[in-house]
Image (tube, rainbow, N blue to C red):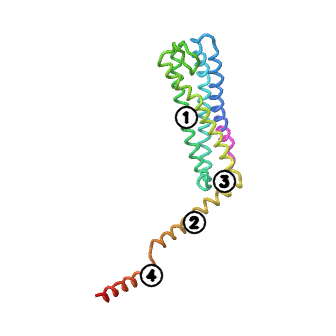
């Protein structure tokens, strides 16, 4: 098994923590606080300013997380190949990461559109006002779903990471190695059994030939 890689794990965990925590705080704190402003034309600009200040930090956090994740995958590749269940969880983690990246990128694109809307009157950051322009209202409705999708996906990544950490315990590693080795060892035996069933042996061929001869004799006697 690989040695300790503290720097990679720290980048992975701290980046993911900032990604998850920032998205959750933004949805609850930034958007929630801006919605409390009395002037409906100032709600979007205030929230947009808050998100704009957080975006560079969030990008750095995501970059650190991805660098740590790729580094861990490379250093742990022998265990991924040898221990049963690790490759499957790595695939799940990769799918969640790709989904979170896609949602984060799309949310930022919508956020830029809301920034350009300026002082359009809104009920809340993700709730349009009856005076809100149609294009702004459309962005708000989509953002209302996406603002919770990011913490949901990154929170799922935290859970998967915790599960994969459990897979690194000595007992889990030993059982995973034995399970993978047992599966590989049983494959040739299974193939041999299938081949034995599919391929008739000498006794089987002899029995079939005898049955055919007996059938021919009975047909001759009937004539």
Position above or below: 167 against 122: below
Q: Which residue is mark 1?
A: 101
**Where does label 2 land, which residue?**
186
Frontmost of labels 2 and 1 is 2
Q: Residue 141 or 18: which is nearer the viewer?
A: 141
Residue on which the image places disc 3: 1
Mark 4 to mark 3 CA distance (whole Å): 50 Å
The x, y position of residue 194, in whole percent, is 49, 69
Q: Place residue 185 in its image quadrant.
A: bottom right
SS class, disc 1: helix
How many residues crowd around disc 4 within 10 Å: few (fewer than 14), some, or many (20 or more)? few
**How far is mark 1 from mark 3, CA to CA?**
30 Å
Residue 136 falls inside the magenta stretch: no
Check disc 2: other Cα within 10 Å, few if <14, some if 14-19, many if 20+. few
Instruction: Compute the Cα span from label 4 to label 1.
Output: 62 Å
Q: Quadrant of the C terminus?
A: bottom left
**Residue receiving disc 4:** 202
Q: Which mark is residue 154?
A: none
Query: Pointers 2 and 3 in contact (CB under 8 A)?
Result: no
Which callout, 4 or 1, points at the residue further toward the start of the chain?
1
Q: Residue furthest right?
A: 170
Q: Which residues are magenta?
A: 1-12
> Gap between marks 2 and 1, in whole Å?
40 Å
Residue 56 position in % (x across, y down): 59, 26
Going from the N terminus, do you reach mark 4 or mark 3 first? 3
Q: Is residue 47 left or right of residue 200?
A: right
């Amino acid at each position: 098994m690989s040695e300790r890689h503290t720097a990679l794990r720290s980048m992975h965990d701290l980046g993911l923590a900032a990604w998850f925590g920032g998205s959750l705080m933004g949805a609850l704190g930034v958007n929630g606080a801006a919605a409390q402003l009395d002037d409906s034309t100032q709600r979007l600009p205030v929230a947009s300013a808050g998100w704009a200040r957080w975006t560079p930090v969030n990008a750095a956090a995501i970059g650190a997380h991805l660098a740590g994740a790729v580094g861990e995958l490379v250093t742990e590749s022998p265990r991924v190949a040898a221990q049963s269940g690790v490759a499957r969880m790595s695939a799940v983690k990769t799918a969640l990461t790709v989904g979170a990246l896609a949602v984060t990128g799309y949310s930022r694109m919508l956020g830029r559109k809301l920034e350009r809307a300026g002082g359009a009157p809104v009920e809340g950051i993700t709730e349009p006002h009856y005076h809100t322009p149609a294009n702004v209202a459309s962005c708000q409705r989509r953002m209302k779903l996406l603002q919770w999708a990011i913490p949901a996906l990154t929170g799922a990544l935290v859970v998967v990471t915790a599960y994969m950490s459990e897979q690194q315990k000595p007992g889990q590693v030993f059982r995973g190695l034995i399970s993978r080795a047992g599966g590989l060892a049983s494959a040739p035996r299974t193939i041999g059994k299938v081949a034995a069933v599919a391929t008739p042996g000498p006794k089987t061929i002899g029995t079939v030939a005898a049955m055919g001869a007996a059938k021919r004799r009975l047909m001759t006697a009937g004539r």
